[in-house]
Amino acid sequence: MKWLLALMAAMLLQLSSASCSGTISQYVPAVMGEDGGLVNVTVSLVPGHGGAFATVEPLTAVSTQESIAQAVSYAYELSGKWGCDALVSFMTPERASYVEGPSAGAALAVMTYALLENRTMRQDAIITGTIDEGGGVGGVGGLYEKATGAAQKGAKYFITPTESFYEVLLLRGVEEEYGLKVLQARNVSELIGFMIYNISIAQEGMGTEKRPIPDLQPYDTAGFERFVPVAQGMIGLEQDAMLALNGTDEETAVMRDFFRNEVLRQNRILERGYAFSAANEAFLNYIDISTITAMVSGGVDLPRKKGEAGACLSQIRKPAMTDANFEWVIGADQREGWAYQKLNETETDGRVVSDERYSRYNDLMYAQAWCSVAKGLASAAPEGGRPVDESVWKGMAAEKLALARSVPAGGPDIQFKLDTAAAAYEQGRYGAAIYDALYVITMGDAAGNATLPGENRTSLWGRIYQSQGAFLDAEGEDAGKILAFARALDGATAEMRAALPEDNAPAEAPGGGLLMLAAAFVLTSSLILMFLLLLMLILGRGNHSQGTRTADRAKQKKGRA
């Protein structure tokens, strides 16, 4: 009997091993620098235990590794086959030494499923999109660049997550120029149906589904009450931009109705105490609405928009940094730095094709929106306190910047913050350098999830980002790294405060002691000299008065004789 069971087990193992074989390759889009390109991804199956492995070269960012694990796991679950391991490798252009981001997740899930089911995939379509635990396809950035790269590779279809209005309008230009058909997919099941079984994906046109107005538990804004007017100001900009959407056509009406619901949503989020979350959503909507308005009106004047953003930045008036307001001033410094960085890296001169102009206009709107937030933070900064000299944080900023530079290569957002941290350090804005470097360090940390939404924070930005983490958690999104960032901000801010002199006086410059000693000597000498002159004057006046009185008495005696 034992030999029969062993034989059956061996046969099952052999059948399992036989199904754990095969290789499949597919192009997935990527943004490298400012260009759109394609990376060839290969998935191979070998006998195993349901694992996923990525090759060492090129390097893969943590977000990419996480997306590989999620995609492969979902494919195993969907097929019901767990006896294999998936080996994932990337072939990048020579200029790309790493792969970053989760945007290949949806494609990897379809590829792994096709191998497990011994199916082939169509080769005329390219997929971009993340994947969540339930198989939903999530949003990604750089759609214009990715779509352009797919079209230039000869793809007939470009499949994306559900797009925003701005993205829909932007990709229409790519469709018209290249004859590319853009499809929107909501989940991996739709992708599998199209890519493997040639089932069409139903499209909903321009009618983007409205986001629900959430019923959230109230959040205590204690410690960042002054941020509420900043959020209100951003929602006001969003609402003004929404009301400026002109046109009587159906598409404009749909967009206006969608963004009107967005304003209601953000006001509700703000009422519940999630001020940063409301401001962040309004910030992104304001940028998209403004870009859409420019696209529809044909008013995409890049040099002019760059000039407007620059003029806004020149109007920022920040208070002197004190121990009572330095967190607010640093926040304003950061956003001012982000805006300048975006202006510097956005080219507006030379020949730019129409769709690229829209994408660059959108970038310039980020600069203008950050400028508005910087102004709001500067206005919210409390008065009073003792002066702070940022040079006391120089050593700490250098340390954090070095750590940030040691983080494995990240995507555009990580690189952007690393660049702004370096620029802030060079300009002597050490507080902004510390916070931006801290973001790079935290977001590049694979184990940055050991914190909870309900934890209390002590610093201004720790409290603000903790509230954002609590909001994301309530919305069912991954809040681990934002919460870890909030905790890290607490630690860094406490360290910065501890570095301030007891009287918070400006730090002494090199050679300052000798200069102060010399100044004191001169001042003392001057006072002594003034005292001697005053004494001589008094004595002289006394002698003169005594002589005058003697003469007067002599005259009086003579008159009486």
Image: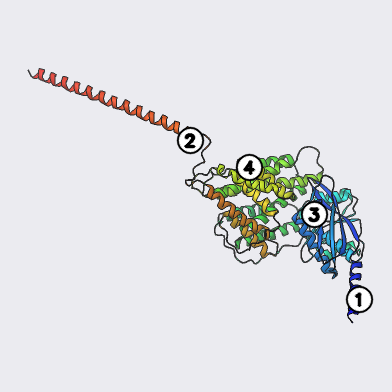
Q: How far apart are marks 3 and 2 (CA)?
A: 64 Å
Give me the disc on residue 178: none
Q: Position of residue 277 (x, y in %)?
A: 65, 58
Residue receiving disc 1: 7
Is residue 243 among what the camera can see? Answer: no
Q: Which residue is drawn at 23% across and 25% down?
A: 542
Residue 560, image quadrant: top left
Residue receiving disc 4: 425
Tag nearer the camera, 4 or 2? 2
Quadrant of the drawing holding the N terminus: bottom right
Residue receiving disc 3: 168
Q: Badges 3 and 2: C-beta atoms under 8 Å apart?
A: no
Residue 33, image quadrant: top right
Q: How crowded is mark 2: few (under 14 residues within 10 Å), some or many (20 or more)?
A: few
Q: How crowded is mark 4: few (under 14 residues within 10 Å), some or many (20 or more)?
A: some
Q: Which residue lies furthest to the left in this view?
A: 561
Q: Where is residue 507 in the image (x, y as percent from the top left)?
A: 52, 41
- Of labels 1 and 2, earlier in sequence is 1
Three-letter code, disc 1 = Leu
- Of labels 3 and 2, earlier in sequence is 3
237 horizontally vs 2: left or right: left
Q: How far apart are marks 1 and 3 (CA)?
A: 58 Å
Q: How far apart are marks 1 and 2 (CA)?
A: 89 Å
Tag nearer the camera, 3 or 2? 2
Looking at the image, is 387 positioned above or below residue 457? above
Q: Which residue is drawn at 68% across and 56% down?
A: 281
Q: How crowded is mark 3: few (under 14 residues within 10 Å), some or many (20 or more)?
A: some
Three-letter code, disc 4 = Tyr
- Of labels 1 and 3, earlier in sequence is 1
Three-letter code, disc 3 = Val
